[in-house]
Image (spheres, grey):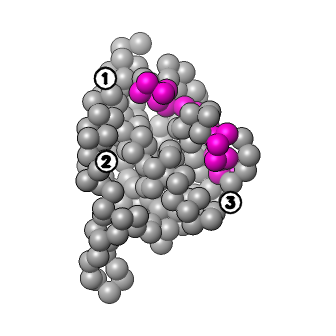
Amino acid sequence: MMKFKTISIVASILLLATACNAKTESSTSVKSSTGTESTNATPSVSKAADPIPQPGGYSNIGYEKLQELLNQGVKVIDIRREDEWKQTGVIKGVKPITFFDRTGRINPNFVPEFTKLVKKDEPVALICRTGNRTKVASQAIAKQLGYKNVLNVTHGMMGWLAEKRPVVKY
């Protein structure tokens, strides 16, 4: 129970920090293959081949890498809420487990369901609506639960859908 309370506190603090920074993160600097840098309101991340390590103990990945991982059978967890899964559908092969409820509280069933499904030594990717909740969840899972290969799908389902990638009904 103490582990869950710690994760709840850390995740809540990180969620608030992420929400406060969400406005500044909407414009991102992207480096092209020629080495020049440009700013896009919604950068394309689908060409990102390798995970990009982040300070919180997790790595960011794009859609090409996500598809590669799905093809390899790596577990992918959609941490959105049920109403979101119903609204947009889900990516075929993902496991839906809600992390945050509508009020921002951590789903008390998340940790037991997650730890039952994913072993600490195996890779796991997380996806949400835009990538903000998965940043928080990825860091909490890496730091608080000790998972070593946590991957955050940047730009989440909205980017996936914007690229007209397939989904299935939930």
Question: x%, y% of residue 78?
Answer: 56, 42
Could you say which is closer to the camera, residue 168 or residue 5?
168
CA gap, disc 2 and disc 1? 20 Å
Whether the residues at callouts 2 and 1 have beta carbons within 8 Å, the answer is: no
Residue closest to the far bottom: 34
Is residue 98 shown in magenta? Answer: yes
CA gap, disc 3 and disc 2? 27 Å
Marks 3 and 2, the one that precedes in the sequence: 2
Residue closest to the far right: 169
CA gap, disc 1 and disc 3? 35 Å
The C terminus sits in image quarter:
top right
Nearer the observer, disc 2 or disc 1?
2
Residue 106, quarter of picture:
top left
The N terminus sits in image quarter:
top left
| Secondary structure type for disc 3 | loop
| Secondary structure type for disc 2 | helix
Question: x%, y% of residue 53?
Answer: 33, 56
The secondary structure that dominates the magenta segment is: loop
Q: Residue at the location (62% across, 56% down)? A: 70
Label 3, on which residue?
166
- Amino acid type assigned to the residue bearing label 3 in the image: Pro
Q: Which residues are magenta?
A: 85-104
Q: Would you call the spot at circle 2 few (<14 residues within 10 Å), some (14-19), or many (20 or more)?
A: few
Label 1, on which residue?
9
Residue 30, quarter of picture:
bottom left
| Secondary structure type for disc 1 | helix
